[in-house]
Amino acid sequence: MFNHQSNLHFISCQGGQTTMLFDVGRRYPRGYIHRHKQHTRPIGFGQQGPAEMHYLLNTVSTMVEGRSAEVSSFEVNDPWGSTSSHVNKMIYAEYPHVTADNHFSGSHVLDLAGKMGFGLTMTTRRDCFPKGLKPFLHHDKTKPGDLRAKAMRYENPIVAISQVPATSETKAYTKTHVSFQSTGATNISGVNNLPSCGLYVTQRQRGRGASKRVWGIEQNEGRATYLSQYFAVDNVDHMISIAMIRYICWKYWHSPYLHALSIAVVACFDMYVECTEGELDQDWYINKKSRMSFRAFRLLLSEQMLKYTPKDNKLPGDECFRAWSRRTKRQRDKSCTSSDSSSLCVTGVNVENYKRAKMSSRRNTTRLCGDLHDIKLHFASLTKTGNSMRCEVCGEPTAIKCGLCNKYMCLYK
């Protein structure tokens, strides 16, 4: 199993569909592809779902650390026949585990993910088996009019394993096929996903008080892996629906724009929750009961949007608007010296501070969070440079620079 787990599923919107990749614990879109008939599908991936999976797996592989760290960008073959350049964003420490439904399944998809080093868990139709496996299964013929296959409907889970050795260009991987037992219309297929598989019972309960009912369901590791990770897409779809960012319009292209805007609001709310958890910066921590709900967050966001004007030049990019550039030099200098506009770039949660905190959470930070021994190391690395720069604390000119932090600080004042 992999530490970083993601979910894969398409989210429908009026006027088109989009296949998106989300983190299980977060609501960050890691990859997406719009669905239409103009895509040129790769060789061997003629179906719609596998072709989209081919593109997304190649896109996510550019975000894994150590893949090709010597270059700053990658080129990925798009399903429509062209190539797109992607910035080398190191997000995953190792190849993540992806969960998808049977629309994206297939033996060629499992082989692709296994050769690249991904973990994969997905559902498959009950009557679809890996190549060469069907002769070893006991199955009954379906009656006329009964379209539901009877194969692999047993009490204990049946597991088929295929191990593929490594080559000079690909990694070794293990493919698995697990029956969904006596319930459900699908089986579970995967690669590099199950260390073991056995039968056990999971307790479920609904209701309260006298109307509370408790029952058990059949479970195995393959089914539990799928059910425990597939909920991320359902949560995003639910939050998009309750955001209610939509209106009736004959202009069909408004619908995908509003859908993308809804996803942006959901991602912003997840960034707010991540900041208030205090793992990025302890100063941003807010108690869980005191945090804003999704409804309160959207109301505040709407209020800020209505009050926003580029004349204040508070946000990056405001200087490009005509409302700011057509002002006189005296008016612009007066706005830059105001306390409101200058305070946004010093403290609080802004873009630069958020990026800095995210980088510090992944790698060794230079902040003084240790004991006196760490402070001694900072003092020992102080050097006097030939030029003066502004102090990080008071802003006065100083030539003293910390070698660990690479920052100037007027130590003797």
Image: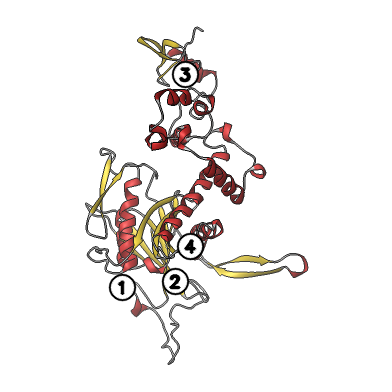
Mark closest to the chain's N terminus, 1 or 3: 1
Q: Which residue is mark 2?
A: 187
Which badge, 1 or 2, comes first in the chain's sequence? 1
Q: Is residue 42 left or right of residue 328?
A: left
Q: Where does residue 158 sit, x and y in percent of width and height?
A: 45, 72
| Label 1 to label 3: alpha-carbon separation | 64 Å
Viewer-proximal residue among 220 and 113: 113
Residue under label 4? 226
**Residue lying furthest right:** 210
Nearest to viewer (mark 1 / mark 3):
3
Q: Secondary structure at mark 3?
A: loop
Evaluate if marks 3 and 4 touch, with contact meaning CB atoms under 8 Å apart. Answer: no
Q: Which residue is mark 1?
A: 131
- Can the viewer see residue 26? no
Q: Which quadrant of the view contains residue 17? A: bottom left
Q: CA distance from mark 1 to mark 2?
A: 15 Å
Q: Earlier in the sequence, mark 3 or mark 4?
A: 4
Alpha carbon distance from label 4 to label 2? 11 Å
Which residue position is annotated with label 3?
392
